[in-house]
Amino acid sequence: MWLLWGVLLAGAAGALRVPPAEETARMARFVAHACDWGALATISTHDPVRGQPFANVFSISDGEVSNSSGVPYLYLTTMEISVKDLQVNGNASLTLSLAQTSYCKEKSYDPQSPLCARVIFYGVVEKVAGIEADFAKRALFSRHPEMQDWPPGHNWFFAKLNIANIWVLSHFGGIEMVTPEDYFKATP
C-alpha cells in the first residue's frame, strides 16, 4: 500500500497535477489529501506554557488514496499531551504543507515559499463514532498501517477536525480564505 501511495503522490507532483494557485478551494482539498501529517496547535493546559499556543505533529488522513473526503481524521489517545489540551478546549488549528511531498523539492521551492502551498484549518476536534469512525479507521490505517499495532491499552479513538475556517497560501500576494462550503464542493 505504501508503495502505491508513493507512486500516486509522486505521479501527482511529477505530472504537475497540483491545481492552479488561483483555484484556492481545490488547492486546499489537494493539499489536505496529499498530506499524511500536520502540525496541530492547541491551547496548552500544562505549566509552564498554560494558556499559550502549543503545536504537535499528528498523522492525519482525509480518506484512502482513491477517496478524499476533505475531513482531516486523527487517531488519538487521552494519554497524549495535546489531547489533554483538547479535553479542556477542543479548538485547534491544523497546518498542512506540500513541503512534505516531493512537489516542492522537485520545484526547488523552500518550505516557507508561498509557491509551496500550505493550508491552515481552524475548528474543533471531535471524537467520531459509528459509520464515520469506520471510515476514519480505513482512511488512517490505509496510510498509516503501523497504527493498527499501537498498544491497545492506550484506549485509542478516532477523531476529526470539524472545520470552521480555512486559509490557503499557494502564491505570492497573501493568504486567502476559503469557506468550508466551497472547500467541500471542490475536488482535489
Image (cartoon, rainbow, N blue to C red):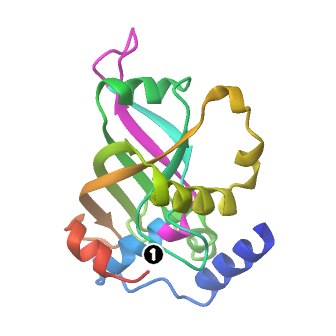
What residue is drawn where x is 31% and y is 53%?
162
The answer to whether residue 24 is above or below residue 59 is below
Residue 44 included in the magenta stretch of the image? yes
Residue 184 located left or right of residue 65: left
Residue 70 on image: x %, y %: 41, 68
Label 1: which secondary element: helix
Residue 117 located left or right of residue 178: right
Which quadrant holds the N terminus?
Answer: bottom right
Whether residue 178 is visible, yes or no, is: no
Residue 76 located left or right of residue 44: right
Q: Nearer the viewer, residue 56 or 1?
A: 1
Quarter of the image holding residue 124?
top left
Q: Specify the farthest residue to the top.
A: 47
Q: Residue tagged by mark 1?
A: 30
Residue 145 on image: x %, y %: 74, 55
The answer to whether residue 176 is above or below residue 129 is below
What residue is drawn where x is 24% and y is 66%?
180
Whether residue 96 is visible, yes or no, is: yes
Quarter of the image holding residue 91?
top left
The magenta stretch spans which residues?
33-52
Which quadrant holds the C terminus?
Answer: bottom left
Residue 81 included in the magenta stretch of the image? no
Q: Nearer the viewer, residue 34 or 134?
A: 134
Crowd class of label 1 (few under 14; some 14 to 19; many from 20; radius 10 Å):
many
Q: Nearer the viewer, residue 161 or 176?
A: 161
User: Tag count in the figure?
Assistant: 1
What residue is drawn where x is 69% and y is 26%?
153
Residue 61 located left or right of residue 89: right
Residue 76 on image: x %, y %: 54, 38
